Image: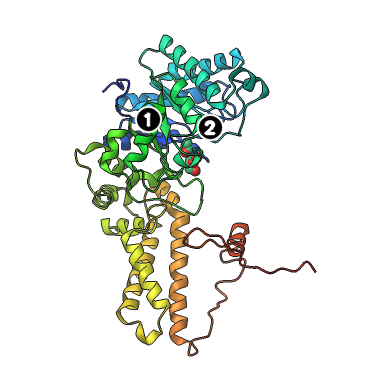
Amino acid sequence: MSLARTKAGSPLNGVVEGFYGRPWTLRQRRALIDWLHQAGLNAYLYAPKDDLKHRALWREPYTRSEAAGLRAVADACRERGVQFIYAIAPGLDLAAAKPNETATLIAKLDQVRRLGASHCAILWDDLPAGLSQEDRRVYGTVAAAHCAVANRVAGALERDFPGCRLLFCPTVYCGRMAKPSVPQSPYLREVGEKLRPGIEFLWTGPHIVSETIPANSIRALRRVVGRKPILWDNLHANDYDSRRLYLGPYSGRAPALRQEIGGVLLNPNCQFEANFIPIHTLGAWCQSARPPAARTAFRGATAAWLPAFTCRGGATLETDEIGLLADFFYLPCELGSRARAYVADLKRVLGAAPDRWGAVERRFEGTSRQILALCDKLTQLDDRDLLYALYPRVWELKETVLLLLAWIAWRRRAPNPKARFRSPDYRPGIFRGGFAATIERLLPMDDAGVFTPAVWAHSDE
Ligand code: GDL
């Protein structure tokens, strides 16, 4: 049994359960800790936005049975050499100027420390703007209030739990939020001056979801806040869009970035079971002296994930099929190579008459059939939790491919190039219906991010 200890300042690499939505279960957290251990990662930051006692009801202590769950997580972490960092997010209603509020905060952290959390974090992300009148009078600024509370907590932890680290997530937690810029942001500058030196600083990169994180963007931040940030990396977070799932590799972060940061905590898909590739490839990025290219790490991860895909009823899955699936649910701004090729083929098919389709269309149909076969096999997975994590997206993929095949069959038969496709299988309101889809059609966004109303002229008559 290895003991979970880190020296102050040694890198913390792993996962932050930091998304909105249903928190993971104890069973899932145990599996996570195994994955972290296997991937050579050493940290789990507990911060599920919708654990009421983490955020909305942060003052309330955990009940006996909730405490048993947290203790079990802490034990599992200790057995696997993973640091269990418990985060609290009091900013929705904390009255910073009232001493008993900080005392309540410290008492709550005391509870989870006694349950076995190795370190603590205090989070100030996603808060309503401004301070109460009283806090404004005492502190003047949001940054001053946040630092005062964190400094007091740090003092108490230092006294009662030597060796316990404290992480701080600022209200301005990415470049895009820093106004007018990272070096000029009054909030960041004040945090840099007032936050006690030992307290560690979380940062999501240039954006909330950062496609890339250039090393020089972090150098600029370090100059302002006076410490190496730990990345809270939302690359694979999907809580902001229930139609997305990210099975692609950890990518868009050059190895040189590693010297600039105190670690990476990945906030991944809400669907726990879908996170194998993100975690495995993060491990490769953090661990290797020379991290492999993202695509190479991805291939390694698909092979390592294969044993989870055993099926009932005789179906067998190959590594290549897992890669195919993951290519269709890759990264926020990137499709995997086979999905990209599929879309490129589709564009050529859509733009040409059937007698010009030739090999492109045959390849397109071939891939379509592979996808459909794969979707069917997945329904036979032994691991039903894995299936259910993937199910909504797999179902949508299958329906989309069937639509494309129906269009191709129709187009082959359609004599008139101006004819338009419709089918009772795709009825308005039933196919892609609902409020969000209605709005998407009224105010579509183009590839450059420009929204243009579909209806320009309207009459008030
Ligand atoms: C955020 C939230 C996080 C959420 C993520 C993606 C931080 C620090 N906070 O802004 O809880 O999961 O976006 O939606 O990232």
Identity of the residue drawn at 30% across and 21% down: 5
- Where is residue 37? Give x, y as percent: 29, 33
- Where is residue 143? Give x, y as percent: 53, 26
Identity of the residue drawn at 28% across and 44% down: 254
Q: Is residue 289 left or right of residue 200?
A: left
Which image quarter is the N terminus in? Answer: top left
Callout 2: helix, strand or loop?
A: loop
Identity of the residue drawn at 27% across and 37% down: 286
Q: Which residue is mark 2?
A: 51
The amino acid sitting under disc 1 is Arg
- Does any atom of ligand 1 lie closer than 8 Å to the CB of label 2? no
Residue at the outermost top position: 159
The amino acid sitting under disc 2 is Asp
Disc ID at residue 108: none
Q: Looking at the picture, tell me which residue is in the foreground, 188 or 112.
A: 188
Which image quarter is the C terminus in? Answer: bottom right
Q: How is the structure coloured here? A: rainbow
Identity of the residue drawn at 39% across and 77% down: 349
- Does any atom of ligand 1 lie closer than 8 Å to the CB of label 1? no
- Where is residue 145? Give x, y as percent: 55, 22
Q: Is residue 19 visible?
A: no
**Circle 2 Cα neighbour tier, 10 Å, few/some/many (<14 / 14–19 / ≥20):** some
What is the total number of numbered labels drawn onto the structure image?
Answer: 2
**Circle 1 Cα neighbour tier, 10 Å, few/some/many (<14 / 14–19 / ≥20):** some
Quadrant of residue 118 within the rendered picture: top left
Quadrant of residue 203 within the rendered picture: top left
The CA distance from mark 1 to mark 2 is 35 Å
Q: Nearer the viewer, mark 1 or mark 2?
A: 1
Q: Which residue is mark 1?
A: 223
Compared to residue 360, the image places residue 243 above or below, namely above
